Image (cartoon, rainbow, N blue to C red):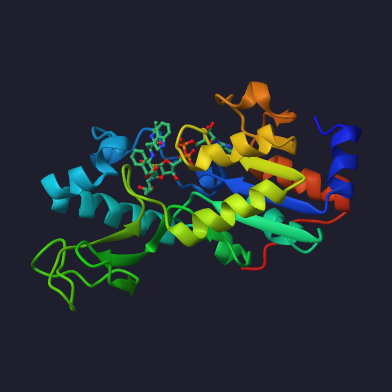
Amino acid sequence: MISQNLVKRLREAHKIVVMTGAGVSAESGVPTFRDAQTGLWAKYDPTELASPEAFARQPKLVWDWYKWRYGLVTAVSPNPAHYALAEMAHLVPHFTLITQNIDNLHQIAGSEGVIELHGNIRRTKCSAKGHIFPGWPDDTAVQPPLCAVCGSPMRPDVVWFGESLPRHELEAATTATLQADVFFSVGTSSQVYPAAALTVEAIKKGATVIEINPHPTPLTPHVTFSLAAPAGEVLPQLLAEVWERAAVATA
Ligand code: BJW
């Protein structure tokens, strides 16, 4: 699956950008965004819950869904894909890691300077003024709890459908993508924009684009290399074959 042509291009690369999606955390036990939710949440469509309209209509339902997911992500650990990416950063002259994930697992695995396009579930913010709080407030009689500063309902610090991505993060991700000679798209269905547009930009500008995903995406026909296997297997293999390094758990 890993051709000599791919190995050569990675060894010669100066600027590598990796963009990850939910699939990179699947082997840690975090359900992917579009996977059926389990248990109590199986009857809800995640694309319906992740919106300001849903929060306005049913704030407690949306808050409880994120609280459940916060519990899930804080109970799991990074997997070999996260560790391989943390190691890769030390092996190329310029390395940028962009993630759509809100689970913080790249950071726990030791990646630095991660560009978070869709926020982070480990932070909360108020819905009126965006006052940010680290972590989740303790349970209170009112759910969602109210902001200690302005009294508006609290929400997770994540980007919902119809909301703008954080400007600085999107600009940094776009700049890195436009300069990349190799661009990885790992574990994302490439259905959500503007994140998917980064892969499109990399393809358009002629970068070597490598997709790692067991299942095809709308962009698979356009990438340079499609590695159809789990990220937790492929990324450590790349590390070993290209740089003769192992993905080591540091956390
Ligand atoms: C594995 C694996 C293993 C499994 N190894 N792989 C242009 C065109 C059309 C629409 C739009 C457009 N521009 C904007 C829009 C509207 C909208 C959008 O994109 N809609 C589309 C659905 C059509 N975008 C927005 O609203 C964005 N805002 C914006 O653009 O503002 C300006 C604007 C507004 C309105 C109109 C126009 C402009 C905001 C997007 C915010 C996305 N937020 C979410 C929720 C975050 C919080 C939360 O998690 O609850 O982010 S949605 C959700 O999707 C989440 C994810 O980060 C994101 C991407 O999902 P991802 O990561 O790809 O996960 P999955 O589940 O889809 O796929 C997992 C993949 O892994 C699968 O392919 C598996 O095969 C694979 N996999 N195991 C490797 N082991």
Residue at the outermost bottom position = 149
- Point 81% across, 61% down: residue: 93
Q: Quadrant of ligand 1?
A: top left
x, y (%) of residue 3? Answer: 86, 31
Q: Is residue 74 above or below residue 225?
A: below
Task: Using the image, determine if residue 118 lies above or below residue 46.
Answer: below
On screen, residue 223 versus residue 219, left or right, reads right
List x then y, in percent, for residue 60: 14, 53
Task: From the viewer's perspective, tell me whether residue 154 is left or right of residue 222.
Answer: left
Percent of width and height locating residue 23: 54, 41
Observer able to see residue 103: yes
| Residue 80 can be seen, yes or no | no
Residue 11, horizontal then vertical, whole percent: 88, 48
Q: Is residue 16 above or below residue 109?
A: above
* Residue 5 shown left or right of residue 39 in the figure: right
Q: Which residue sits at x=41%, y=40%? A: 33
**Quadrant placement of the N terminus:** top right
Residue situated in front as seen by the camera: 7 or 207 = 207
Q: Nearer the viewer, residue 2 or 18?
A: 18
Residue 151 placement: quadrant: bottom left
The residue positioned 9% from the left and 65% from the top of the image is: 142
Q: Would residue 136 appear left or right of 234 to someone viewing this image?
A: left
Q: Residue at x 73, y 48 (%)?
A: 180
Camera-nearest residue between 206 and 138: 206
141, 133: nearer the viewer:
133
Q: Is residue 97 above or below residue 192?
A: below
Which image quadrant: the C terminus? bottom right
- Numbered circles on residues, count: 0
Q: Picture quarter containing residue 149?
A: bottom left
